[in-house]
Image (spheres, coloured by chain):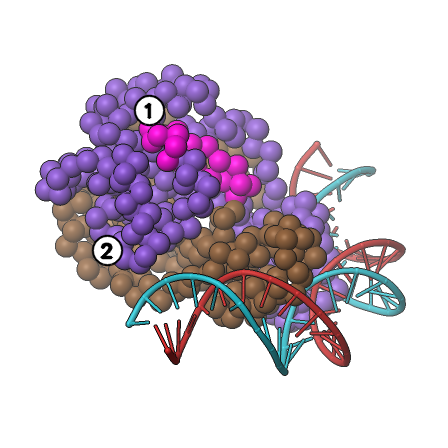
Chain colours: A purple, B brown, C red, D cyan
Amino acid sequence: MLESFLERLEGVETLSDLDAAILSLSSELDVEHVVYHSVKSTGEQYAALTYSDEWVARYLEKDYARIDPVVQACIRRFHPIDWKRLNWSGKAVKSFLHEAIDSGIGNQGFSVPIRGPSGQFALFTVSGSEKDDRWATYTQERSRELILASHYVNQKALEIECGSDQLEIVSLSPRETDALTMLALGFNRAQAAESLSISEHTLRVYIESARFKLAASNTTHAVARAMNQGLLNIC
Amino acid sequence: MLESFLERLEGVETLSDLDAAILSLSSELDVEHVVYHSVKSTGEQYAALTYSDEWVARYLEKDYARIDPVVQACIRRFHPIDWKRLNWSGKAVKSFLHEAIDSGIGNQGFSVPIRGPSGQFALFTVSGSEKDDRWATYTQERSRELILASHYVNQKALEIECGSDQLEIVSLSPRETDALTMLALGFNRAQAAESLSISEHTLRVYIESARFKLAASNTTHAVARAMNQGLLNIC
DNA sequence: TGAGCCCTCGCCATTTTTGGGGAGTTGAAA
DNA sequence: TTTCAACTCCCCAAAAATGGCGAGGGCTCA
């Protein structure tokens, strides 16, 4: 099952190929729904999913990602999560849940969080309507396949979207990295300069050159971009 | 092979258990060396590896992570990488490579980058001395196992280190998130306020309350912490 | 129904950052 | 060997952020 999907993935070259491949997963994985949704630090998004257009529109309109326990949990966790194990209490959350079920999302789901370079974050989800015990068996048996599938889907998505044009390969000098790292840690310029044993002026030079390299409009922006690109020691 | 390791991992409860489990992987995976190294956004680190203490000390002393092509590539990529495919040109890099080989690291290696919540980043590496073709066969056959192994090792490491005390569960209100997001994108307060259609003063209130929640000493710090914790829309 | 969080607005003084200039050494790459 | 990037230091004036004061309405959960 996974084999055939990975083989199919090999031949994928465009986003529409990828769309088709992901959608085909629902039958291969024997679930009602499959969702892959990637968000980059630039705000750029890509999604391939079998949910109804109405539900997707509704979800976006209401900004449900803000309260969706699946999203909230996956952002904070590393390991895949069964929807049953989430906390569905709270008024807004409950009405969201009912609405989701009414829209045919299913009462069971399993989501895998995936993180890529430069702050990319993606979610791979399978869902459907099943009884608890059958679903538990299903997820237990398939969890490894689901993890691998999510990994390879994400890899392919990044490959296609970024292509070989990794235009954002900015590299900071050690001192620039140091400077931004201190700022990210909450030091002001005077403190940071002292920590690094250099004059505040010198520190400024580093910050400014880093800002220039990162095409950032101010210090906060530079730190944010550097963090997103994993250029800082603390990130 | 993977099965027995995962079973063993089940019983792991402390970091020393994990150490032992990881080290045992070298025989199970049939390689000379295994390395797992995790870095959190707090700077907290954990490593379990079969390299010699001398080499580790040397590596740290010289801050080789800054030039190590394996580290540099893994920070920027999502997929696992065979060391042979990296760019080893450059004076410093070449001398680093020779020193590494002399220290018994091996001439072949395969590294899997792993990213967790809150900016956690880890590297799972196997290395050894092999001829190119044998190594190519090895990595091709085992890549999925290596990916899964790295995933489960990281999951366990996070589980042990964070435990149930996820003390850093700060949550920002939607407007606070919006405010920090705009700042992270490089807007100054005036621009951010305009984009959000609120007064600059109101924006300040959000920034300040976010700063308070995040225990941050200034705006840059608050943005950095929020990003690390995956609280912003752009991260 | 009250406690508590969220959203919204204003002013003033102080501190910090930023933008604009320059200048000299070192070491590595081409 | 020349070029280029990195590291270090300095001044001044304008712009931006911060700290501290205060105020009211809306919503949710216990």
- Residue assigned mark 2: B18
Query: Does residue A177 lie above or below B30 as drawn?
Result: below
Q: Chain of mark 2?
A: B
Query: Does residue C15 lie above or below A101 as drawn?
Result: below
Give amino acid for label 1: Leu
Task: Report the residue at 39% width, 64% height from top.
Answer: B168
Q: Is residue A54 magenta?
A: yes
Disc 1 from disc 2: Cα separation:
38 Å
Residue B115: horizontal and vertical position, in percent? 39, 47
Give amino acid for label 2: Leu
User: For residue A103, which quarter of the picture?
Assistant: top left
Q: Quadrant of the N terminus of chain B?
A: top left
Task: Report the residue at 64% width, 50% height from top.
Answer: B195
Task: Report the residue at 23% width, 23% height from top.
Answer: A27
In depth, the one of B102 and B182 nearer the eye is B182
In depth, the one of B153 and A28 nearer the eye is A28
In depth, the one of A133 and A223 nearer the eye is A133
User: Considering the numbered disc 1 on the image, is that residue within a helix, a strand or a loop?
Assistant: helix
Label 2: few (<14), some (14–19) or many (≥20) C-alpha neighbours in 10 Å: many
Residue B48 is at least partly visible in this image:
no
Residue A72: horizontal and vertical position, in percent? 37, 51
- Residue assigned mark 1: A23
Q: Is residue B210 magenta?
A: no
Kindly identify which numbered label has been placed on residue B133: none
Query: Does residue A4 lie above or below A189 as drawn?
Result: above
Residue B118: horizontal and vertical position, in percent? 42, 55
User: On the rendered structure, is B185 left or right of A102?
Assistant: right
Q: Chain of mark 1?
A: A
Q: Which contiguous range is marked in magenta?
A: A37-55
Q: Nearer the viewer, mark 1 or mark 2?
A: 1
